[in-house]
Amino acid sequence: MIVRREDDQWEIIKQHDHAYLSFQIASHWKSDAFPHPALKQDVLYAIRHHDRAWIPLDQQIVWNVAEQRPYDFTDYPLEEKLLAYSRGIDQVAEQTPYGAILCSIHYASFFATNKGGSPRIAAFLHHEQERRQRLASSLTVASLEEAIQSHYRILQFCDDLSLYATLNPPGAKKSEEIGWFRDGFRQEFRFAPHGMMAQWLTDSDIQVKPFPFISEFEVKVPAARVSLESSQAAVEWVNGSNDYRIFRFSSG
């Protein structure tokens, strides 16, 4: 889950709902800027379901006692998270082996350095590398590695832009934004030689430059606002989302 403090409440957005926003962003991508278009539906499926691993985990709030807040996607307990990641990729692979390769790369990227030398992370990375090799051998795609890298770049950008929207407070000034995307996005595209940037224009409007989409568009994402107190927050969360956020993307 994505957790953000807002006054005397926590705003929480489910990961699969954040993935829906990522999917809507990808769905508006200009056709002439979408590489290997024959694989577009596989890519869109992967983006829509790249966080389906979180569906069971997000059914309830798990409380981070040390931080006095709900665990979010960045610090959720590792063992449960890795097991969920593997199951989520399994489910994507049932529908699209190519899409599962993209999701596997995405999850593996979180632990690329494994600085702590965790055996559990090392085992996960090894398993996913073997999975990708196995899935790739079953595909007949021209320039497979180039296609994978170009499509993963789109998945990663759509994920990042969705996180930019959901992690920041509505209408945030640049100085108020989280540091991850304040200076732009990490992805490189031929149509954006100087990089991709986003900024808030209003509480709902986000300007993206250069603008890679076919038109301006709006997306409504479910959100829940729950108590700062753990037991009350748990009850309110189980009762379901009670609000939403609206995001409009434009060239400004």
Image (tube, grey):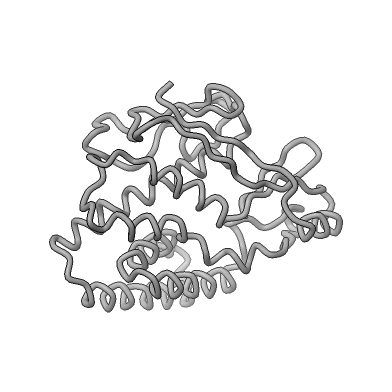
Relative vertical location of residue 227 with respect to residue 174 in this rendering, above or below: below
* Residue 80 falls in image quadrant: bottom right
Indicate the quadrant containing the C terminus: top left, top right, bottom left or bottom right.
Answer: top left
Q: What x and y, as percent, mark residue 157?
A: 38, 45
Image x and y of residue 152, in percent: 32, 54
Spot occupied by residue 211 in the image (x, y as percentages of width and height): 35, 30
Q: How many marks?
A: 0
The image quadrant of residue 192 is top left
Relative to 81, say whether 249 is above or below. Answer: above
Give the residue drawn at x 81%, y 39%: 8
Please name the residue shown 21% across and 53% down the image.
36
Please say if 26 is above or below 16: above
Left or right, 26 with reference to 3: left
Does residue 95 lie above or below 2 as drawn? below
Quick one: 56 or 180, which is closer to the camera? 56
Is 251 positioned to the left or the right of 80 in the image? left
Front-most of residues 218 and 133: 218
Q: Position of residue 244 (x, y in %)?
A: 66, 42
> Which residue is painted at 67% across and 43% down in the image?
4
